[in-house]
Image (cartoon, grey):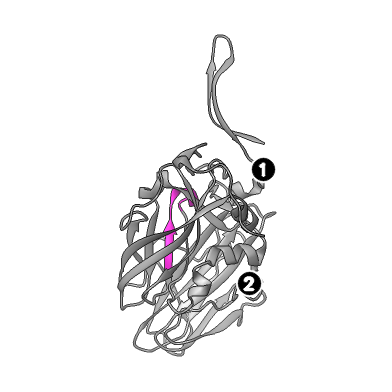
Amino acid sequence: MRVNTKVVIDLESDRVIERQSFEYSGPVEQCGRGIELIAGFATNPGATFTALTMSTGQSSVIRGTDITKGTWLLDAWAFNATAGELRIRSPRLHDFFSGIRNRVTAAQTAPLLNNLLNGAYAQRLYAQDSLTLELTGGGAELDTAALLIGYEDLGGIAGRFIDAPTLFKIGLNLVTIEVTVTGVTTGSFGGAVAINSSIDNLIANTDYAILGGLVDTRGDAVGITGVDFGNLRLGFPAEPSLRNLTNSWFLNISDAFNGAWIPVFNSANKTQTTVDVQTNGAGGTYIINLECVQLLPGQVPGGATGAAVQAGGGGAPTSAGQPR
């Protein structure tokens, strides 16, 4: 189909005097997708399951969605100084007594539900359901946890996402975006900086897919927020020892669940696309490398909150692809 980005009509003659558009052949349902990273903390939980205090501005209640479309718990992880357990419960899930309960290794922010490299299964979630999120851990520390939730159709969000086959078809060049974030000690997300704050090497009016990223300091989660993602925060574990997993985090999710879960942003929105960190009471400075791919122009339609796609932005070549 052809997507119009600008149409000028002469009202007297009803003629179209100017039109800017591009051909799009990808799946239309991608336009309503969203990913949200929610996180919280428990202060001195000890051996008793303690409800998470959610990060500032976040909630453990699943957003209201079209109930005919899927909402999924893509993964979850925790960052404890002392070994403990993360428990996720709801009357809408298997049971409210024990629920999804997994051991948390001390001082390692590893995914607890899915490896994403060796097969994965996503738990279905339900609109407006209130999840009970709890941690055990140390008796004299602040422990943290995060959940990554995928919405197939979230009204009013219209994030921009592609699947793995589309990435391989329209990807042009790898590029690393590096930022430095200073985490806060409160257990909330903090230290947000613009994605171009450290090295502004992005080509103007160009789309980039975010595959994942690397960190040099251990924390709970790296968050990325922007208008191209419907102003929701998405992200990955802040774990420096699992580089093979986090560096292609969203690509792995897309591949594991056979769907469009690779986020795309336009460099026109770089100052409104921010990166932050959620960690424990230690805070810390994080150098974050986001692994991105420059995309062929005009291939990913802009969502309701996304940037207009430029038909020839950045002087990019007109063909792309990967060895198959």
Q: Is residue 119 visible?
A: yes
**Could you say where residue 164 lies in the image, as x and y percent from the top left?**
62, 58
Residue labelled with disc 1: 25
Q: Relative to 207, does residue 281 appear above or below in the rendering? A: below
Q: Relative to 68, does residue 124 appear above or below in the rendering? A: below
Local SS, label 1: loop
**Badge 1 amino acid:** Ser
In the depicted view, which residue is nearer to us: 47 or 39? 39
Q: Relative to 137, does residue 219 appear above or below in the rendering? A: above
**Could you say where residue 67 lies in the image, as x and y percent from the top left?**
67, 55
Classed neighbour count for the residue bearing mark 1: other residues with Cα under 10 Å, few (<14), some (14–19), many (≥20): few
Along the horizontal axis of the image, is 225 left or right of 249?
left
Which residue is at the far right? 68
Number of marks in the image? 2
Local SS, label 2: loop
**Could you say where residue 270 lies in the image, as x and y percent from the top left?**
39, 49
The answer to which image quadrant residue 88 occupies is bottom right
Classed neighbour count for the residue bearing mark 2: other residues with Cα under 10 Å, few (<14), some (14–19), many (≥20): few
Residue labelled with disc 2: 91
- Please state the extent of the stretch shown in magenta in the rendering: 222-231
Asked if the residue under mark 1 is in contact with the one under mark 2, i.e. CB atoms within 8 Å, the reply is no
Q: Is residue 185 visible?
A: no
Q: Relative to 17, does residue 44 appear above or below in the rendering? A: below
